[in-house]
């Protein structure tokens, strides 16, 4: 079907535009998290739940819809995705608090999950002989989309944060138009006459698939967890966090666009081994970084490490476990999103909150608490938090909430500025420190990839393993 399918180019362009819309939603939601803290008085834990919903919701959607590509139809799923993107944006821009923000992020994530559930098997079907390379080319539009949307968001810095979410709409309309008209092919597994039950059996009886399912959860935690937090953490330190995110994803886009040249020389597993180690080094450096130059240098190392992990993992599964079909690719994408959304993103926020009091200067914080207690207009909750700060031998965990509440008080300019001057550098330091907790995971998966590469070498090499998978599992040529 490759090269002879008349609609392949338009379908591939539509898939790229859909991944771009997914990227726009990721960047927009990441870009507004810092603003949501101040407007709705949310702590890092709540922000982590909103950011996490934007990921684990995608995982649930991928699991649910990846098995319906043939039964429900790829075109119909993409129509639902477009409706979800528009509805998610509408819910977020009209939000009145944490709950509505959470629901909006979840709806947006479900739409993103549909995009992944369709576009990965679509491209794997259109380009059966070049799956890893073409999936890398498809997914360069995730970092590429973040570069484009990040630059747009930067120019909108002075506007209300709600306008930032609207940027998701144009790429949504584009992929809707591109997918209108062309005929979608049956997925590779369906073309071979495989039924959904066959895909479930292949998933359940393929050990290497389960190994890579677990590895996907960790590698995506290394990539998307920090990327979700970087804008908010760096903006707290007075840097243009969205531009650093643009820089990271610019490197990723270039790497994915040229991944085929690397994969012509080394196997995907060797590439994954090296990439995970470099990502861990970048995260370690970023957790200690101070100042713009160090932060950018560490971010570049991190970007090189994570740049082609996602599509290479997807390509590995498509090549080594072909009979798992769209279900296998959907489960892989879901495993990564589920881990990042339910565990990594909220956990990084919780870790940052736990270390925040230790990063705040105690003496000026107590002086500010004394000032608030002596003010006749202090509300009961603020008074109680200030009293707790003065009574405790060390700063309590409520210090962050206290400083956020004071910093948001427009009626007390001097106290608000003092609170912001204490809070923001501490948010930056505690946020960066949280990245350090991911470094051991990077080293672990790097060693596992090395063992898989060694096993492949002893069995005749990666190419031989791909051929065995095709014939032993009955996948189509």
Image: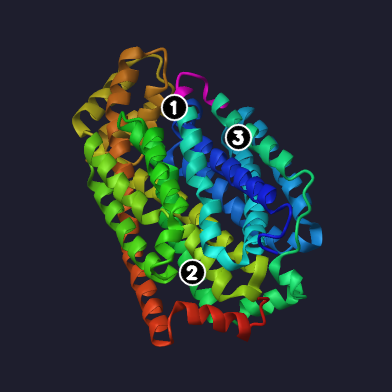
Going by the image, does 287 lie left or right of 180?
A: left
Residue furthest to the front in view is 4
- Check the picture and name the quadrant holding the N terminus: bottom right
- Kindly identify which residue carries mark 3: 168
Rounded to the nearest whole Å, what is the CA distance between mark 2 and mark 3?
Answer: 31 Å
Magenta-colored span: 154-162
- Kindly identify which residue carries mark 2: 214
Residue sitting at x 33%, y 51%: 302
Which numbered disc flags the more N-terminal residue, 1 or 3?
Answer: 1
**Residue 321 image point, x, y percent:** 58, 75
* Disc 1 + disc 3, Cβ < 8 Å: no
Q: Residue 2's image quarter?
A: bottom right
Using a 10 Å C-alpha cutoff, classify the residue at mark 3 as few (fewer than 14 neighbours), some (14 to 19) or many (20 or more): many
Rounded to the nearest whole Å, what is the CA distance between mark 2 and mark 1?
Answer: 36 Å
**Residue 299 image point, x, y percent:** 31, 45
Secondary structure type for disc 1: helix
Residue sitting at x 57%, y 26%: 162
For the question of whether residue 383 can be seen, the reply is yes
Rounded to the nearest whole Å, what is the CA distance between mark 1 and mark 3?
Answer: 15 Å
In this view, the residue in front, 363 or 469, is 469
- Check the picture and name the quadrant holding the C terminus: bottom right
- Kindly identify which residue carries mark 1: 154
Q: Residue 277's image quarter?
A: bottom left
């Amino acid at each position: 079907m490759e090269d002879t399918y008349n609609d392949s180019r338009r379908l591939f362009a539509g898939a790229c535009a859909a991944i771009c819309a997914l990227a726009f939603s990721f960047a927009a939601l990441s870009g507004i998290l810092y603003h949501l803290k101040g407007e709705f008085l949310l702590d890092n834990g709540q922000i982590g739940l909103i950011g996490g919903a934007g990921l684990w919701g995608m995982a649930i959607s991928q699991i649910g819809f990846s098995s319906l590509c043939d039964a429900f139809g790829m075109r119909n799923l993409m129509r639902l995705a477009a409706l979800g993107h528009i509805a998610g944006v509408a819910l977020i821009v009209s939000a009145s608090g944490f709950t509505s923000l959470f629901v909006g992020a979840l709806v947006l994530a479900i739409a993103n999950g549909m995009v992944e559930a369709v576009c990965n098997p679509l491209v794997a079907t259109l380009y059966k002989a070049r799956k890893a390379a073409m999936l890398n080319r498809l997914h360069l539009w995730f970092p590429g989309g973040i570069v484009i949307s990040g630059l747009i968001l930067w120019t909108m810095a002075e506007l209300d944060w709600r306008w930032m979410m609207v940027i998701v709409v144009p790429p949504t309309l584009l992929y809707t138009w591109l997918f209108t008209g062309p005929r979608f092919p049956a997925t590779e597994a369906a073309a071979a006459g495989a039924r959904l039950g066959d895909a479930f059996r292949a998933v359940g009886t393929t050990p290497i698939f389960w190994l890579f399912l677990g590895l996907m959860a960790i590698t995506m935690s290394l990539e998307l967890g920090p990327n979700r937090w970087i804008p908010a953490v760096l903006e707290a330190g007075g840097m243009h966090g969205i531009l650093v995110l643009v820089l990271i994803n610019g490197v990723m886009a270039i790497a994915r666009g040229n991944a085929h040249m690397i994969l012509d020389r080394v196997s995907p597993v060797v590439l994954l081994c090296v990439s995970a180690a470099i990502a861990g080094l970048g995260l370690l450096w970023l957790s200690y970084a101070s100042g713009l130059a160090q932060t950018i240098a560490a971010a570049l190392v991190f970007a090189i490490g994570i740049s082609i992990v996602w599509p290479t993992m997807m390509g590995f599964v498509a090549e080594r476990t072909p009979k798992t079909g769209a279900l296998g690719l959907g489960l892989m994408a879901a495993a990564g999103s589920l881990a990042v959304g339910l565990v990594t993103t909220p956990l990084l926020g919780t870790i940052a909150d736990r270390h925040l009091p230790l990063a705040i200067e105690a003496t000026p914080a107590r002086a500010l608490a004394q000032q608030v207690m002596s003010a006749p207009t202090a509300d009961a909750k603020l008074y109680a938090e200030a009293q707790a700060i003065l009574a405790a031998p060390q700063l309590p965990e409520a210090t962050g909430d206290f400083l956020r509440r004071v910093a948001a008080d427009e009626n007390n300019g001097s106290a608000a500025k003092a609170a912001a001057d204490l809070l923001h550098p501490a948010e930056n330091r505690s946020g960066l420190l949280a990245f350090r907790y991911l470094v051991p995971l990077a080293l672990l998966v790097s060693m596992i990839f090395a063992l898989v590469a060694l096993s492949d070498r002893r069995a005749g090499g990666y190419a031989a393993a791909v051929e065995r998978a095709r014939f032993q599992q009955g996948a189509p040529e």
